[in-house]
Image (spheres, rainbow, N blue to C red):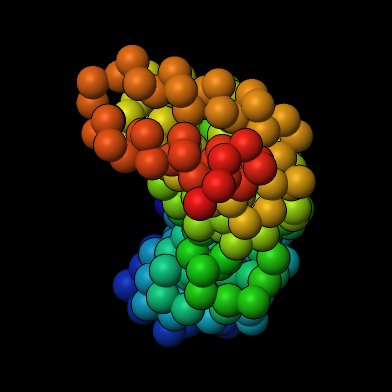
Amino acid sequence: MTDADNIIATIESDPSRFDEHVEDLRTILESGETDARRSVTKLLGDVAGLDPQIGTRHPELLELAFDDTDSIVRGLAIDVVAIITKTIPEEGTDFVPHLATALTDEELTGSSQMDGIATLGVIDRETDKSISEADEALASLLRDAEGHVRETAAINLDDTVKAAPREFPSMLRAFVSVLDDPRSQTRLRAAETLTTVAYEDVEALNDVDEVLAGLKELRSYNDLPAERVEKMINITEVGAGYAEE
């Protein structure tokens, strides 16, 4: 076994010894072989499940993982923050900039993208930290990623955009672009988000007529309730000043 293997095995058998080996773990993340760096980052996630405050105590380890040249290590770093945030949302707030940058990485797997999106959603809902710096990255995923990733973004971030639409101009435009998405949940969340924004702050929308046109196209989908679609159209028309309540 290599020195890295021995250190990892020691911590795996006794996670309470993590802190005494931080310098060794940092050295591995800075200059170790790819497999060793992957193993250390996975170990961070395993320990975070037992001790979610390791991110606060040793942020430099996660920062090294986020900056790694290997996409798997970067994806594992997202997973670690997801584990930390799921238990103590406040502990994840310092990593919003890292998540925002990581989610622009085209080499990330869909599962890591979904973990990053869900984690930002938790931070937005459960803490006072703004995730608006991730607006463009999230909009790109909502618009261009695989179907299950787009759906994850729509489901996890619709309330985020409704609550502060002016902080998410890119997400608003992306929601317009997915009104014809193949997935019904993506279409529905987009429609509900845009309807709410049109009613409460129509000037935040770039083009309310484009939104209305997209909502009216939803009439052609049989998997969305017709009454619900008509109600969203009517509410949007009221918000736009085209109809009275």
The residue depicted at 55 percent of the width and 67 percent of the height is: 123
State whether residue 183 appears in this view. Answer: yes
The residue depicted at 53 percent of the width and 81 percent of the height is: 53
Q: Position of residue 111 (x, y in %)?
A: 41, 38
**Against 26, is 167 above or below?**
above
**Against 142, is 7 above or below?**
below
Question: In this view of the protein, which residue sits in the foreground, 48 or 230?
Answer: 230
Residue 70 in the figure: left or right of residue 53:
right
Q: In the figure, residue 231 lies in which quadrant?
A: top left
State whether residue 154 appears in this view. Answer: no
Q: In the figure, residue 114 lies in which quadrant?
A: top left
The residue depicted at 62 percent of the width and 56 percent of the height is: 200
The residue depicted at 49 percent of the width and 45 percent of the height is: 235
**Against 130, is 105 above or below?**
above
Q: Position of residue 132 (x, y in %)?
A: 72, 55
Question: In this view of the protein, which residue sits in the foreground, 97 or 205?
Answer: 205
Q: Position of residue 43 (x, y in %)?
A: 45, 60
User: Going by the picture, which residue comes out furthest to the front?
Assistant: 244
Question: In this view of the protein, which residue sits in the foreground, 207 or 75?
Answer: 207
Number of numbered markers: 0
Q: Position of residue 153 (x, y in %)?
A: 49, 42
